[in-house]
Image: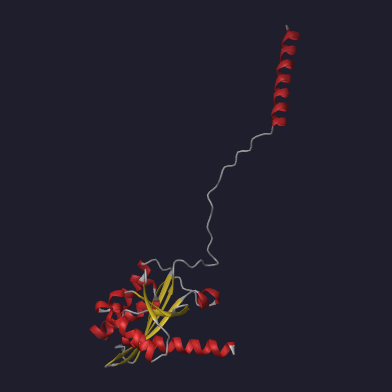
Amino acid sequence: MIEKKIVAKNIKEYVIQEYISHELPKASYSKIDIKKTPLGEKVIIHTSRPGLVVGKKGSNIQRLNEVLRGKFGMENPQVEIVEIESPNLDAKSVAERIVSSFERFGPKRFKSIGYRALQDIIDAGAKGAEIVISGRGVPSSRSKTWRFSAGHLKKSGDISINHIKRSLVVAELKSGSIGIKVNILTPDVILPDEVKLRDEIEVKVEPEKNEVKQIKKLRKKKEEDGKEERTEKS
């Protein structure tokens, strides 16, 4: 029973996510979170452009509330907008921005678009990034898949599975479909092979009270021995 509820919840979130991605303006939507509250269900939309998502006088939010209540059967849905602090470190935002550029300027400038997006990711502080553009719509005689990468990016292990941000978006163009894959290793991820050297600290060891007394006794004894030697010689 628990497994069925989890699967049903994931399917519902996916359907809502697909609907929102088609209804909201391009390059303005990253992901959603659905949470249950005592007052109803809260839909949190993460976006890099909250003004476009909200719409004029909140028109988009009102429309989404009506659709969530009528089409998806949510009880008292509440739509909350959360702005992404670093859009260039969000894989979905970067991929959607590339798709928007393709739709505006066409795929002929795909190299400059890919390199510019990659540079924006690295400038934002990412440890590594990779952008893969592939499909029939890519205007290239040599290869239909182009890879743009920079920095350090893990391809296997726990870091690759659980910590790398990934996104796959498809651009439907007149020349054909183009897939954009974006993988980002964000600066907050601590790699297991990172080593930080500590600054050398000088430790001053002070002798104990008993040691101080013994040292004073030895000095006093040496002074007395020296006096006796001088008197004997004289």
Q: Is residue 145 visible?
A: no
Q: Is residue 42 visible?
A: yes
Q: In which quarter of the image is the N terminus?
A: bottom right
Q: Name above or below for residue 112 compared with residue 67.
A: above
* Residue located 52% across and 73% down the image: 159
* Residue located 52% across and 63% down the image: 194
Q: In which quarter of the image is the C terminus?
A: top right
- Looking at the picture, the colour scheme in use is secondary structure
Q: Name above or below for residue 143 compared with residue 130.
A: below
* Coordinates of residue 225 in the picture (x, y in percent): 74, 16
Q: Name above or below for residue 144 compared with residue 233.
A: below
Q: In this view, does 21 lie to the left or right of 204?
A: left
Q: Name above or below for residue 76 compared with residue 222.
A: below
- Residue extending farthest to the top is 234
* Residue located 35% across and 67% down the image: 123
| Quarter occupied by residue 17 | bottom left
